[in-house]
Image (cartoon, rainbow, N blue to C red):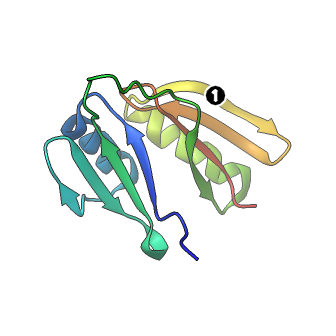
């Protein structure tokens, strides 16, 4: 049975967004074109940044990427301090949710990135 193996994030400038994600997550692209850049993640999964054509396709932002971390609330706070030190836009400061400590930042296009504890 086929399973999803790529997450696509729509961006306005793929190279700019690739630099943002490279810096944020400490990874390098595995595939690059001017409008589509992919990163290899664990388990054969990819994260792709795509600047789609503008002739009628208007993607909406209804989801978020999530980075789950071991180490409890202290690790969530350390990650928040590291990313805010890089000047990342904060959407939600660290707070407690039903699943634990979490926060949300945005990439240059407003796509959401949540940090949360491992379930």
Picture residue at 67% right of the left edge, 61% below the top: 71
The local crowd at label 1, few if under 14, some if 14 to 19, many if 20 or more residues have their Cα within 10 Å, is: few
Q: Residue 72's spot in the image, x, y percent?
A: 72, 56
Residue 46 sits above or below residue 66 on the image? below
Q: Residue 43's spot in the image, x, y percent?
A: 48, 75
Position of the C terminus by quadrant: bottom right
Is 108 positioned to the left or the right of 76 in the image?
left
Quarter of the image for residue 44 reads bottom left
Q: Which residue is mark 1?
A: 93
Picture residue at 45% right of the left edge, 39% below the top: 83
Residue 13 sits above or below residue 114 on the image? above
Residue 53 sits above or below residue 43 on the image? above
Nearer the observer, 39 or 51: 51
Which residue is farthest right?
98
Picture residue at 24% right of the left edge, 58% below the top: 29
Residue 39 sits above or below residue 80 on the image? below
Is 69 positioned to the left or the right of 21 in the image?
right
Is 113 positioned to the left or the right of 54 in the image?
right
Q: Residue 100's spot in the image, x, y percent?
A: 79, 47
Nearer the observer, 92 or 110: 110
Is disc 1 placed on a helix, strand or loop? strand
């Amino acid at each position: 049975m086929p399973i999803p193996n790529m997450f696509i994030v729509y961006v306005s400038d793929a190279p700019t967004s690739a630099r943002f994600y490279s810096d944020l997550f400490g990874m390098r692209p595995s595939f690059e074109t001017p409008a589509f850049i992919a990163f290899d993640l664990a388990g054969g999964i990819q994260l792709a940044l795509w600047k789609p054509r503008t002739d009628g396709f208007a993607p909406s932002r209804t989801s978020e990427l999530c980075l789950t971390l071991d180490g409890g609330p202290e690790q969530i706070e350390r990650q928040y301090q590291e990313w805010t030190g890089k000047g990342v836009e904060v959407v939600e400061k660290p707070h407690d949710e039903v699943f634990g400590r979490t926060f949300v930042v945005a990439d240059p296009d407003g796509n959401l990135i949540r940090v949360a504890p491992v379930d």
